[in-house]
Amino acid sequence: MSDFATKITKKNKGNIVKNVLCNSANLGLVPQVNYFDREIANTENTDGYYVICNGDFVYNPRKSTAAPFGPVNIYEGEEAGIISPLYLCFSVHNIFPKFLYYRFKSSAWHSYVYSHGDSGVRFDRVSIKDDVFFDMPVYKPAQDEQIKIATILQLIDERIATQNKIIEKYESLIQAICDTLISKEEQQVMLSFSDFGQSYSGLSGKSAEDFGEGYPFITYMNVYQNQIIDSTDVGLVKINETEQQSVVRNGDILLTLSSETPEEVGMGAVYLGETYPLYLNSFCFGIHITDEAKIYPPFLAYYVSSQSFRKAVYPLAQGSTRFNLQKSDFMKKKFSFPVIEKQRKIYSILKAYSDKLIIEKLIMRLLCKQKCYLLRQLFI
């Protein structure tokens, strides 16, 4: 590294530069106000911050799932920025910057930091001296090969960014269609969730030792994050015979009872996976939908994400730091539903777009898998 990298030591004397940056594993080097939605650093007291320019690198030693040895990012902003002195900043020469950037996105350098880092008291930070970091060996192919490697990886990144936008558009479209079709439907019936079947509570009091073996279970986050849950989405938990009432059946509606925000209370899902024993965990409750109910279970997966449903449930959420829903209050509340014939038609429309969304998400996973493969193979 020391053959082509030089540590940046220029300080922001006189607080001349006001563009405070942070180094994010997922977002890269971005203005602090964009990352935190507010200024964290006092812009009038940043004379100890390092000044960086376009093309400079910053190493943030804070560990994360996305960057187990801390992120190294390149600054691509046009105006000069300033970065906390807790970070290591350096400029490069005689190497294609984007090639080095992608090398740091690979795991090729992890073994060096692991074996040469100091054992510090901070478990959440990498502890490695600057001179040791710059002693890191880096295989540097010919310049044209560096450019080719960086170019193909950048093209994949651009394709992933485009795919993200496609997925976001489909998600917004499905939500808009869902809200429009449900709220504008003229033929409506007033029903409570107690009309649909018998409710049951999720398991509670499970300790960490309970997870990892036994029967599969669904957590609060499964319910909140998914409209339709498949058996591949769930974890495992031990269940005793007295807890059989929490078994989830094919087609059950699942809802959240407790959340950190009132908007998330009541968010739900419909389980449509295999019919082997599956259990509902705490902060949730479920409803076994009967055959006689005037509701189409797959339609409920979309209905509970609609704005009309959210607006009706929101006032029922009680609390200050954590918001809770009383199951008894919820079960007897009347909601406006399209008649069941219309439910099936609405579902068929939404299902067509959802199937397309599933394909787009599969394409995204394949693109990310391709990028991970290239990052493993192109750097030594």
Image (spheres, rainbow, N blue to C red):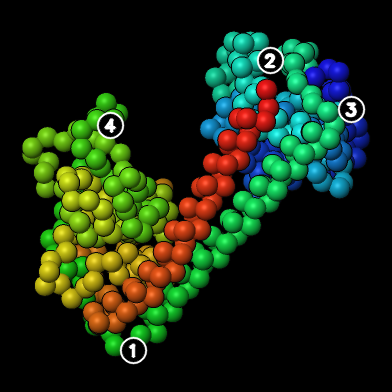
In which quadrant of the rendered view does residue 122 lie? top right
Residue 205 percent location from the top left of the image: 22, 35
- The alpha-carbon separation of the residues under discs 1 and 4 comes to 47 Å
- The alpha-carbon separation of the residues under discs 3 and 2 comes to 25 Å
- The alpha-carbon separation of the residues under discs 2 and 4 comes to 36 Å
**Horizontal side, residue 246 vs residue 182: left or right:** left
Residue receiving disc 1: 186
Question: Which quadrant is the N terminus positioned in?
Answer: top right
Q: Which badge, 3 or 4, is on the more N-terminal residue?
A: 3
Q: Nearer the viewer, mark 1 or mark 3?
A: 3
The residue located at (68%, 51%) in the rendering is: 158
Pick out the residue farthest to the left. Answer: 241
Q: Is residue 299 above or below residue 156?
A: below
- The alpha-carbon separation of the residues under discs 1 and 3 comes to 69 Å
Residue type for callout 2:
Ile
Residue receiving disc 3: 94
The residue located at (76%, 31%) in the rendering is: 100
